[in-house]
Amino acid sequence: MEKTTIENAIKENGFYLSTIVGDSMMPLLRNRRDTVKIIPVSGRLKKYDLPLYKRPDGKYVLHRIVKVKKDHYVISGDNRGWREKVPFDWVIGVTDLIYRDQKEITADNREYVAYVKKTCRKYWIRRVKHIIKKCKLCIKNR
């Protein structure tokens, strides 16, 4: 029996529901507590969208678009201090709804939009903290 992929589930059902695993999108998405609904991508995504993409190593990642370039997206987790270039063809779907504590959160929800903008503005604070943390580890491991 062939294992169903996320891509196939989206194609067959028109959406894919998944509980979040990991901490890269904290505090918005909590590890093994919150669920997202992923739908097919239609056209070019925009800044602040939350796509699901698949890296060449087969790992699925759900991170936020912080910039749209000519041939790729610049993407980062809300709880990460680095960014990643993601070619358009890696993206397999985009978050349509977030389910948190029995509530549906849509992309046009006023509180959600405010959270997203605030989080993206604070990227450089996360970046500096990440660099400091790496430096402390380097010094500790000498």
Image (cartoon, helix red, strand yellow):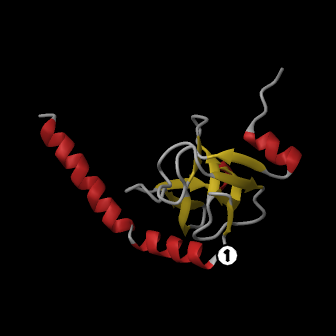
Instruction: Please tell me in which quadrant of the rendered image residue 97 appears.
Output: bottom right
- Across and down, in percent, residue 122 comes to 38, 70
In which quadrant will I find the C terminus? Answer: top left
- Across and down, in percent, residue 37 comes to 72, 54
Return the residue nearer the eye: 105 or 139: 105
Which amino acid is tagged 1? Asp
Identify the residue shown where x is 63% and y is 70%. Answer: 46
- Across and down, in percent, residue 39 comes to 77, 56
Identify the residue shown where x is 34% and y is 67%. Answer: 124
Q: In the rendered image of this protein, does residue 26 appear above or below residue 44?
A: above
User: For mark 1, does the 10 Å Cα neighbourhood hold few (<14), some (14 to 19), or many (20 or more) residues?
Assistant: few
In this picture, residue 3 sits left or right of residue 50: right
- Furthest toward the top, the residue is 1
Q: In the rendered image of this protein, does residue 90 appear above or below residue 102?
A: above
The residue tagged with tag 1: helix, strand or loop? Answer: loop
Question: Disc 1 designates what residue?
Answer: 108
In which quadrant will I find the N terminus? Answer: top right
- Across and down, in percent, residue 44 comes to 70, 66
Instruction: Please tell me in which quadrant of the rendered image residue 131 appears.
Output: bottom left
Identify the residue shown where x is 77% and y is 27%. Answer: 3
In this picture, residue 75 sits left or right of residue 100: left
Number of marks in the image? 1
- Furthest toward the right, the residue is 12
